[in-house]
Image: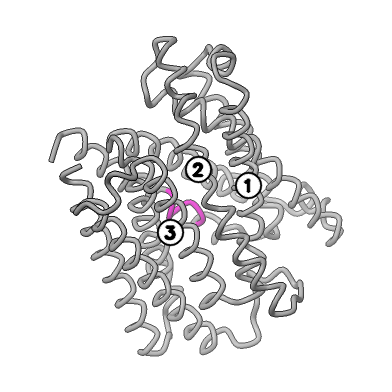
Amino acid sequence: MSQSHLFGFFWLFVAGTTGGAFVLPMKFVRRWKWEHTWLVYSVLAFFILLPVFALLTVPKAWQVYQLCSARVLWIVILNGAGWGAGSVLFGLGVDALGMALGFSMMTGIYTALGTLVPLVMLTPDLVWTQNGLLIIAGNVVTIIGVVLCAVAGDVRNRKIQQGEAETQLGIKFSFPVALTICVLAGVLSAMLNFAFAFGSPMIDAARQLGYSKDDGANVLWLLAILAGGTLNVGYCFYLFQRNRNWSMLWRNTAPWDWFHAAMMALLWTASLFVYGWGANDLGRLGPALGWSLWNAFLIITTFACGWLTNEWKGSPRNAIRLLMGGIALLIVATVLLGMGGAGA
C-alpha cells in the first residue's frame, strides 16, 4: 500500500469521525427548536466557514470558475442543489417511515449510489477486478450493517420512548408518499459525491493556476454547498412560518445554544474538506472508495456518540445485540473497503 493511500485512509477516518459527531452538540441545545439550531448551523457552515476557508486557500476562486466550461459549473451546482434537497427530505423520511425502515433505506441508497455510480462511470475497467469486487462487497456489508443498526434503534424507541417524538416534525404522510420521499432522499443525498466525482475538471482548473488538488476540491465544495445550503436555510424559514416561532431565535436563547450550533458547523465543515483530501489521496478510486469509507466511519461514530451519551441506556437486550452486530458488520465493511483500495 502506498503512502498516499495510507494518508487517504487516515483523512477519511478523521472525516468520518468529525462528520459522525457533528450532530452531537445538538443534544445539548436547551431552548431552541430544531429549526433554530439548524438555521444557525447552516448559515455558519455553508455561508461563513466554508467560503472563508475556501477563499483563504484559493483566493483566485473566481478565475478557477472562469476556466471551467458551463457544463462543469452546472454539474457542480445542480448536484449541490440536489444534495441540499436530499438533506431536507432525509429528515422528512425518518419522520415518515421511522428509524428502522426510513433511515436504513435512505442511508443504503445514498451510500450505494454515491459509490457505484462513480465506480462504474469513471473506472469501468476496475469494476470486475479484485479491487472493484471488494469495494462492491464492502458496500453490501455496509448496507446490511446500517439496516441492523436502524432496526436496533427502532426496537429501542418502541421500548423506552413510547409516546415521545422529539425528532418528529408532526407531518403525516400516506405510505406511498413516505416511500417516495425516502427513495428521493437517498438518491438526492448521493449527489454530493456526484458533484465531487464529475466536477473534477474544476479541480484540474485550479491546478492550472498553481493550486494543489486539495485546494481545488475546496473551490468545488464552495460552489456545490452554497447551492445546497440555500435549500436548507429555506426549509428552516418554512418551519418558522408554519410553527410561528421565529422570535424564539433571539427571545428564548442562551450563549451555549449559539456555541453548540457553531460547533456543529465547525465539525461538519471540517469533515467535508477532509473528505476531499482523503478521496484525492486514493487516486482513481477516490470518489467511489472514499465515499464508502467516509460513510462507514461516519455511521460508526454516530452510533458511538449515541452510546456514550446514554441514548441506549435501558434498551432491551435484543436491541443491544442488533446494534453490536450492525457495528461489527460496519467494521468488517471498512476492512473490505481498505483491501479494495490497497492494491489500486
| Amino acid type, callout 3 | Ala
Disc 2 secondary structure class: helix
Q: Is residue 311 left or right of residue 176?
A: left
**Front-most of 85 and 123?**
123
Q: Main secondary structure of the magenta part?
A: helix
137 is higher (above) or lower (below) than 9: below
For mark 2, does the 10 Å Cα neighbourhood hold few (<14), some (14 to 19), or many (20 or more) residues?
many
* 103 on left or right of 175: left
Identify the magenta region: 19-23
Q: Mark 3: give few (<14), some (14-19) or many (20+) Cα within 10 Å.
A: many
Mark 2 and mark 1 in contact? Answer it, CB < 8 Å.
yes
Which mark identifies residue 112?
3
- Classify mark 3: helix, strand or loop: helix
x and y percentages locating residue 125 in the rendered image? 29, 44
Pointer 2 or 3: first along the chain? 3
Instruction: Count the marks.
Output: 3
Q: What amino acid type is highlighted by mark number 2?
A: Phe
Disc nearer the start of the sequence (3/1): 1
Q: Which residue is mark 1?
A: 82
Q: How is the image coloured?
A: one colour
The residue to which callout 2 is attached is 194
Q: Residue at x 60, y 60 (%)?
A: 185
Q: As rendered, which of 341 and 309 lies closer to the eye?
A: 341
Question: Cα distance, mark 2 to mark 3?
Answer: 12 Å
Residue 115, given in percent of the width and then of the height, sits at 40, 52
Q: Quadrant of the N terminus?
A: top left
Mark drawn on residue 279: none
Q: In the rendered image of this protein, does residue 296 appear above or below residue 270? A: below
